[in-house]
Amino acid sequence: MLTDHWPLRRLRLTTERLVLRLPDDEELAAVADLAAAGVHEPGERPFLTPWTDLPPAERARWVIQGHWSGLGSWSPDDWGLGLVVFRDELPIGKVWMGATQFAVLREVRSSSWLGLAYQGQGYGTEARTALLHLAFAELGAEAALSEVFQDNHASQAVSRKLGYRPDGISRDALNGGAVISDRLRLTRADWRQRTDVQVEGLEQCRSFFGAT
């Protein structure tokens, strides 16, 4: 079976309302359709990589190719876990958590997006809570990092709610101009553990994360 060789297929994070897991091919197509339909209002630009500026069909392909690329290039020293967020078995968005040299640094980075119809209902906070539980409670992380544009108020609010603290700024070039992001850090000391997150299927793939 595929899961004998790729046990990440068994990994599942469950919260009160959501399930986070790898998608099958049809579910990946559905989440690509969701991205094609839009993940933010016109005129907004929440991501440094301007993938949402692409036409809808190209945006959908970008999601699919990015998912495949992340799995295909996976190694314990450089990994990125892209999970689809399901609500009542319907895909509503995608989250990502990655690390480089996790066995040494014990730090993870994360990002996420939700379809427009599912924003403003607490799903983003709930999904990130699940990722943080995986990172801190299950993998032994010491810190979770995030970078957020200063005008991305929704993402900033989620980070503050979860206990992230300011960790400086980053300046990047985007479309010929400079953009500033706040660097945010959540340490193990500031992380607030929840009891309503369940993790299944991790033991078989713990070594994939460099967390043995």
Image (cartoon, rainbow, N blue to C red):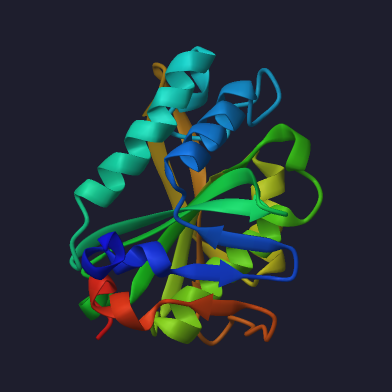
Q: Is residue 176 above or below residue 64?
A: above
**Label total for image:** 0
Q: Is residue 211 above or below residue 182?
A: below
**Residue 54 visible to the viewer:** no
Q: Quadrant of residue 67?
A: top left
**Residue 190 visible to the viewer:** yes
Tell which residue pokes out farthest to the right in this image: 121
Q: Give coordinates of residue 26: x percent, y percent.
A: 48, 37
| Quarter of the N terminus within the rendering | bottom left
What residue is shown at x 71% (from left), y 46% (from top)? Answer: 154
Q: Give coordinates of residue 68: x percent, y percent.
A: 30, 41
| Quarter of the C terminus within the rendering | bottom left
What residue is shown at x 64% (from left), y 83% (from top)? Answer: 192
Q: Give coordinates of residue 25: x percent, y percent.
A: 42, 40
Q: Give coordinates of residue 136: x percent, y percent.
A: 47, 81
Q: Nearer the viewer, residue 12 or 180?
A: 12
Q: Taking 71 as reference, is 82 left or right?
A: right
Q: Is residue 34 above or below residue 27?
A: above
Q: Nearer the viewer, residue 32 or 100?
A: 32
What residue is shown at x 52% (from left), y 41% (from top)? Answer: 27
Q: Taking 204 as reference, is 49 left or right?
A: right
Tell which residue pokes out farthest to the top in this image: 55
What residue is shown at x 43% (from left), y 17% (from top)? Answer: 58
Tell which residue pokes out farthest to the front in this image: 1
Q: Nearer the viewer, residue 101 or 119?
A: 119
